[in-house]
Amino acid sequence: MPHQEPSQHDHGQPLSGRTREGRRSAERAWTLILVGLVLLVGVLSYVWLGPAAAPSRPRSTVAELTPSRVPLVTGSEPMEQLFIKAGCPVCHSIPGIPGAQGRVGPRLVLGSTGPIRLADPRYRGKGKTVREYVIESILDPGAYVVPGYPDRAMPRWYGQKLSAEALDKMAVYLEQLTDEPASPRR
């Protein structure tokens, strides 16, 4: 039988059982090193970036307005308390109501602005009088959004927290308010 030379490795070294084991050990070592690096990168990413969280609603520093936060307004309250209990001053400026200096919604002087809004071609509501417009604006705030103010700023459920008597009292009060200064009483 002819004598066979042991196969040669790239470096000209003969491969014996011992070197094959060495090569396998080296491959295992590299595999373990790569797995270790991947794990290390994962751990460092977790530490630096935090856990990958599912998208969530942005956290607000302002308390969210929910139906449970607004008590039922019955209409038996004095006018000032009626608006305050309903939460109107948070978003609206209302003459005659202390602290009602909100800027999210329009100034509530419906004696002046109500007829203009009812005549606006963009008005899609059903109200025919200022009083009806006021009630509709609370019960269905999307029927007419005052230009310059955001749609959906007024909660759609708000009217559910006001009794019919409360709605009527608010409408009567607001339809009498105008931008004109009150004349001094004599």
Image: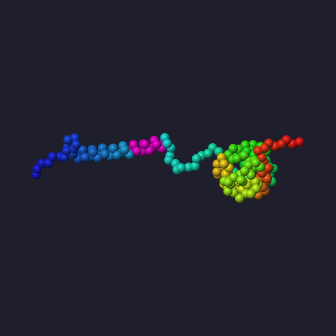
**Residue 31, image x and y in percent?**
34, 46
Q: Nearer the viewer, residue 109 or 158?
A: 109
Q: Quadrant of the C terminus?
A: top right
Residue 22 visible in the picture: yes
Q: Is residue 181 left or right of residue 67?
A: right
Residue 27 locus on image (x, y percent): 31, 45
Report the span colored magenta: 36-47
Q: Would you identify the image quadrant in which residue 160 lies?
A: bottom right
Residue 101: percent from the left, percent from the top? 73, 43
Instruction: Please give the name of the residue rendered at 73% of the width and 55% of the height, measured from the top-left corner.
Output: 133
Which SS type dominates the magenta stretch?
Answer: helix
Image location (x, y in percent) of residue 74: 77, 55
**Is 175 included in the stretch rendered in magenta?**
no
In percent of the image, x 22 and y 44: which residue is there?
9
**Residue at 27% in and 45% down:** 23
Tell me if 169 is positioned left or right of 66 in this view.
right
Q: Residue at x 27, y 44 (%)?
A: 22
Q: Nearer the viewer, residue 137 or 42?
A: 137
**Magenta-colored stretch includes residue 44:** yes
